[in-house]
Image (cartoon, helix red, strand yellow):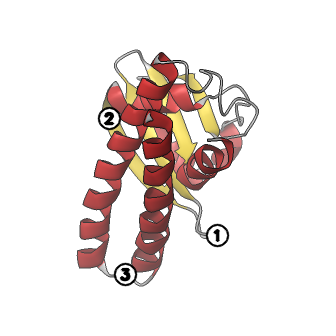
Amino acid sequence: MWKNIAKELATELKEVTERFVIALQQNDLEVCRSLSFQAQTKLTEMFRELRNSQDHNEIPNKLGKNSSLGYFQEADSNCDEFSIFKTQRSFFNRNEELTLRDCANAVFHCKQRDYYVDPDGTHWLMYITDRKQLVIIDIKKVCDVIIANI
């Protein structure tokens, strides 16, 4: 039940994200703001349904592991890691152990958030959590993993 809702929301979120990237590349800030609000709502709902699905054993908690969803490490309060990620990606190592549950937890426990779109159009969501974790996710990959595995 919950997993089907999560899959539907992932499909919708992927579409909204793609439209957001295009609007950003065209410097259409009004459309970006509208799409950003839609995306945040869908993202939160998608991860809520995903966690419900995992809590009721519809899908495994380790879904997404080994899918290269993004970066996951301890946050360093002495630097602006979001800016470093945007300008010096070589300081970050892709974490193969990041699961969809980790991504959901980052959304629900975030103290700081930001986004970044690479020149190639990759849309990154970046979170620092109340648990002092830095989680940076490729939202398209997250949606693709949900769509393909549910």
Q: Is residue 21 left or right of residue 44?
A: right
Residue 30 at x, y = what percent? 23, 77
Distance, label 3 to label 2, CA atoms, is: 24 Å
Describe the element under mark 2 as helix, strand or loop. strand
Quarter occupied by the C terminus = top right
Residue 52 at x, y = what percent? 41, 25
Q: Residue furthest front?
A: 1
Residues packed near mark 2 inside 10 Å, few (<14), some (14 to 19) or many (20 plus): some
| Pointer 2 residue | 112
Residue 25 at x, y = what percent? 46, 79
Q: Amino acid at mark 3?
A: Asn
For the question of whether residue 83 can be seen, the reply is no
Q: Amino acid at mark 1?
A: Asp
| Disc sitting over residue 120 in the figure | 1
Q: How many marks?
A: 3
Name which of mark 1 and mark 2 comes first in the sequence.
Answer: 2
Looking at the image, is 146 positioned above or below residue 123? above
Q: Amino acid at mark 2?
A: Gln
Distance, label 1 to label 2, CA atoms, is: 25 Å
Residues packed near mark 3 inside 10 Å, few (<14), some (14 to 19) or many (20 plus): few
Q: Is residue 41 left or right of residue 147?
A: left
Q: Which quarter of the figure has residue 12? A: bottom left
| Disc sitting over residue 27 in the figure | 3
